[in-house]
Amino acid sequence: MNGMAAYADTRGYDQNDGEQIVLYTPLVKRIAYHLMSRLPPSVQQDDLIQAGLIGLLEALRNYDATQGASFQTYARIRIRGAMLDEIRKNDWAPRSVHRKARMVAEVVRNIEHRTGRDARDHEIAQELNISLDEYHQLLQEASGHRVFSYEELEVEAHGGIAGLADREKGPLEGLQTEDFKRSLAEAIAGLPERERMVMSLYYDEELNLREIGAVIGVSESRVCQIHSQAVIRLQSRMTQWVGA
């Protein structure tokens, strides 16, 4: 019995669930393919899809239409969250990668605090005492740091939607969620133009790295580096919410 079958068996899986799972399976696969574009070969696509199907089944069980969010919006958050949980559970990134990513975020924060503007690649490399090529390689290695930190931020930002069916939020928690979303939106809007464009194409338009490279005229590996730097910059600017 696979993971979803075991889960369904314990939760009273019915025929209507089966029909909905067939209907939304393409969404599960699309989210998995999108995440896979920045994960190493050691992460199995089938494992992500299975986790996503369990997330879909959770969404079917918990969705409450009276809360205002469409089912597709709610399901997308549940599916992505289940996949991120699966990646975290089998964390593939060496500790050195996490350490380096935190170090880069700290350097970015220091430079931007000191200069009052966006930290530039050569400045970050200089402060790290490495060459520009070495810095770009570091970004490549850190591209999946903390299992897609931006996706985690996005899921957290939508927590008011994802959590509505599970628990009732108090007034203070509701205000905190709105403050978080506002801070995240401001941090994204403040990214350098190219980083902001890559984030928009990847998360809003759901293009893969190769497609984004074709749009902005750079290699797929360079898109990965730009994306990684944008995520690290966001982490450095959102430490009051998520830490470094």
Image: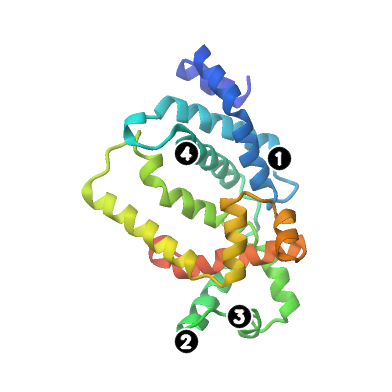
Q: Residue 90 or 158: which is nearer the viewer?
A: 158
| Residue that label 1 marks | 44
| Residue that label 2 marks | 114
Residue 107: quadrant of the picture? bottom right
Q: CA distance from mark 1 to mark 3?
A: 35 Å
Q: CA distance from mark 4 to mark 2?
A: 40 Å
| Residue that label 3 marks | 120
**Is mark 4 in CB contact (under 8 Å) with mark 1?**
no
Q: Report whether residue 25 is seen.
A: yes
Q: Secondary structure at mark 2?
A: helix
**Is mark 3 in CB contact (under 8 Å) with mark 2?**
no
Could you tell which of marks 4 and 2 lies nearer the N-terminus? 4
* Residue 187 position within the rendered picture, expressed as x and y whole percent measured from the top left: 46, 67
Kind of residue sitting beneath label 2: Arg
Q: Residue 32 or 85: which is nearer the viewer?
A: 32
Q: At 42% from the left edge and 52% from the top edge, which residue is drawn?
A: 157
Q: Nearer the viewer, mark 3 or mark 2?
A: 3
Could you tell which of marks 3 and 2 lies nearer the N-terminus? 2
Question: How many numbered discs?
Answer: 4
Kind of residue sitting beneath label 1: Gln
Q: CA distance from mark 4 to mark 1?
A: 25 Å
Q: Secondary structure at mark 3?
A: loop
**Is mark 4 in CB contact (under 8 Å) with mark 3?**
no
Could you tell which of marks 4 and 3 lies nearer the N-terminus? 4
Q: Nearer the viewer, mark 4 or mark 1?
A: 4
Q: CA distance from mark 4 to mark 3?
A: 36 Å
